[in-house]
Image (cartoon, grey):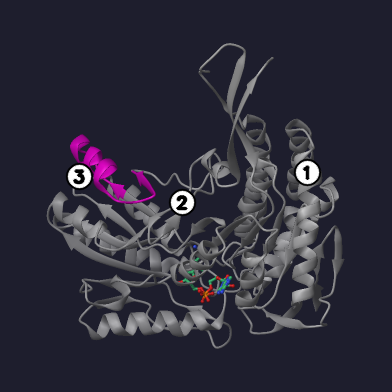
């Protein structure tokens, strides 16, 4: 049993009210840790610390801030293998994936460290002599970040690294289900020399923490990753208090396979990304649509891949897919699958919970599911693939655009005109065609429509944490 504390103003501490919440291993159901649950006093301390930390951090030259961030990245890379077991124990993913998550996070920090040195403004043509007119870029201020349990390091690191690169401080409320790895990552920033108050980490009752921090006058921007329903609530709150916000919300990604595609590559890419992290990935392929002539081939290929997944405890090296991260997901997923079958969808494999302890759900493939089924309209966030058919490119694009979710989309096709139409006509924040190429640090990452707004990757990610100030100075 380990205790995960709050990190406020450069110090680790229990919650002032003495509250703890148990953390469960989703593979066994055992309690493996407890996490400190912040009180209003703790949140007040965190907001004030972030305000003091902001004043210190923004005064440090960008090049020096980059050095400190590179130190944090190096520490995280060094500690990746030591951090990973706790991540697997609390989240469920295979150990190798946890190690990768920590290493990838180090790459994110390195990339943002450098990008912070490229926060450039513009000069504006002046309207008279001896005038300098510039659009300056300045950090927006202390940020409140809210991050989920599917990538305890990977989600939090994007918010921390981008806000620090912009010159902001941050209070992160990470997921109570998976606190240890996030805390270990924050410790890397502490040990790297980030001044007190620049990065703060809290846990607590999610709605209480968000209500407190979003309303707090010292917090100037919000960044949330999670479901569309919660994102909508937080956006309304942010609007009420006129706070800038970034929303990375749910998705229901279309994956279109055309008859002329490289089918082996399509099936391989599909299976790897559908069952990765037990399907608990906002950009996971979900609505798989296959052109009629190759429908059976793709379906059969995917069913074989699903059956080959090895379900188990993430600490077992033979495991390729771990449990769902918490119990409430099992009921939610099972209800969606049962509804799809009741409405006439064909269940080809899976479709039930597995093992006799923990929160395991079998890799599942459904086919020919009617559009009225809930799973065709609600984000499954689970290892469930839905394979339906389409006839023409028009049909495929219409189905891709049918939902208000618009985060990621994928396609496999050879004809240049099809690729052009998909690139321009699919309404989505990101589309990857004929390969899987999303979520690297230098690439914009974000959705549109009900999947949110703002960016968590690429230079665009800094925009959400920067104000533009117009300065016009006449020399006299
Ligand atoms: P949920 O909506 O209860 O919670 C999702 C996340 O938001 C959790 O981390 C939770 O702690 C946080 N949260 C919930 N209410 C909050 C509030 N009022 N203020 C601040 N944070 C709050 O759902 P869940 O059962 O934990 O997860 C299922 C759904 O969440 C999925 O269907 C998926 O849409 C979404 N989700 C998305 C991502 C992502 O990467 N975009 C990650 C995890 C979960």
Judging from the image, what secondary structure is the residue with disc 3 in? Answer: loop
Mark 3 neighbour class, 10 Å CA radius: few under 14, some 14 to 19, many 20 or more:
few
Residue shown at 18%/62% (left/top)? 389
* Residue 296 part of the magenta-drawn span: no
Q: Which residues are magenta?
A: 411-433
Q: 374 or 133, which is in the foreground? A: 133
Marked residue nearer the N-terminal end (1 or 3): 1
The CA span between labels 1 and 2 is 27 Å
Residue 251 higher or lower than 462, as above or below: below
Tell me whether circle 1 and circle 2 mark residues in contact (CB < 8 Å).
Answer: no
Which mark lies nearer to you, 1 or 3?
1
Judging from the image, what secondary structure is the residue with disc 1 in? Answer: helix
Q: Which mark is residue 446?
A: 2
Q: Which residue is mark 3?
A: 260
Residue 105 placement (x, y as % from top left): 65, 50
Can the viewer see residue 362?
yes
Q: In the displayed orientation, state which residue is furthest to the front.
A: 476
Q: Image quadrant for the N terminus?
A: bottom right
The CA span between labels 1 and 3 is 54 Å
Tell me whether circle 1 and circle 3 mark residues in contact (CB < 8 Å).
Answer: no
Q: Which residue is mark 1?
A: 57
């Amino acid at each position: 049993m380990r205790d995960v504390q709050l990190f406020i103003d450069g110090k680790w501490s229990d919650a002032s009210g003495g509250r703890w919440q148990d953390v469960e291993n989703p593979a066994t159901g055992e309690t493996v840790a407890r996490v400190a649950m912040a009180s209003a006093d703790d949140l007040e301390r965190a907001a004030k610390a972030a305000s003091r930390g902001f004043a210190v951090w923004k005064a440090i030259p960008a090049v020096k801030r980059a050095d400190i961030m590179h130190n944090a990245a190096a520490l995280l890379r060094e500690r990746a293998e030591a951090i990973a077991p706790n991540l697997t124990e609390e989240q469920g993913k295979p150990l190798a994936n946890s190690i990768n998550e920590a290493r990838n996070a180090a790459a994110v920090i390195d990339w943002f460290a450098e990008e912070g040195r490229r926060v450039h403004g513009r000069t504006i043509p002046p309207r008279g002599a001896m005038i300098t007119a510039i659009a300056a870029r300045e950090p927006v201020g202390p940020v409140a970040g809210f991050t989920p349990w599917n990538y305890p390091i990977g989600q939090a690191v994007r918010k921390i690294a981008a806000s620090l690169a912009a010159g902001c401080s941050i209070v992160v409320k990470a997921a109570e289900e998976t606190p240890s790895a996030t805390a270990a990552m924050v410790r890397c920033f502490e040990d790297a020399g980030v001044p007190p108050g620049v990065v703060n980490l809290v846990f607590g009752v999610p709605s209480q923490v968000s209500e407190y921090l979003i309303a707090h006058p010292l917090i100037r921007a919000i960044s949330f990753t999670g479901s569309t329903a919660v994102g909508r609530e937080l956006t309304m709150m942010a609007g009420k208090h006129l706070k800038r916000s970034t929303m990375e919300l749910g998705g229901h990604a279309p994956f279109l396979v055309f008859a002329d595609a490289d089918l082996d590559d399509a099936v391989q890419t599909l299976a790897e990304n559908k069952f990765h992290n037990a399907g608990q990935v906002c950009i996971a392929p979900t609505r798989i649509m296959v052109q009629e002539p190759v429908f059976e081939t793709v379906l059969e290929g995917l069913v074989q891949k699903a059956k080959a997944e090895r379900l188990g405890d993430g600490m077992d090296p033979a495991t390729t897919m771990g449990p769902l991260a918490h119990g409430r997901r099992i009921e939610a997923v099972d209800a969606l699958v049962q509804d799809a079958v009741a409405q006439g969808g064909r269940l080809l494999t899976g479709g039930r919970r597995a093992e006799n302890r923990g929160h395991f759900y079998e890799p599942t493939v459904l086919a020919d599911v009617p559009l009225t089924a809930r799973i065709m309209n609600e984000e499954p966030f689970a290892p469930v693939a839905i394979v339906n058919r389409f006839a023409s490119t028009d049909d495929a694009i219409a189905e891709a655009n049918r939902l208000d979710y618009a985060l990621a989309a994928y396609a496999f096709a050879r004809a240049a005109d099809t690729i052009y139409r998909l690139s321009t006509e699919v309404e989505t924040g990101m589309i990857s065609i004929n390969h899987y190429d999303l979520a690297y640090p230098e690439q914009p990452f974000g959705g549109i429509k009900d999947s949110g707004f703002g960016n968590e990757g690429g230079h665009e990610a800094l925009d959400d944490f920067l104000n533009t100030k117009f300065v016009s100075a006449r020399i006299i």
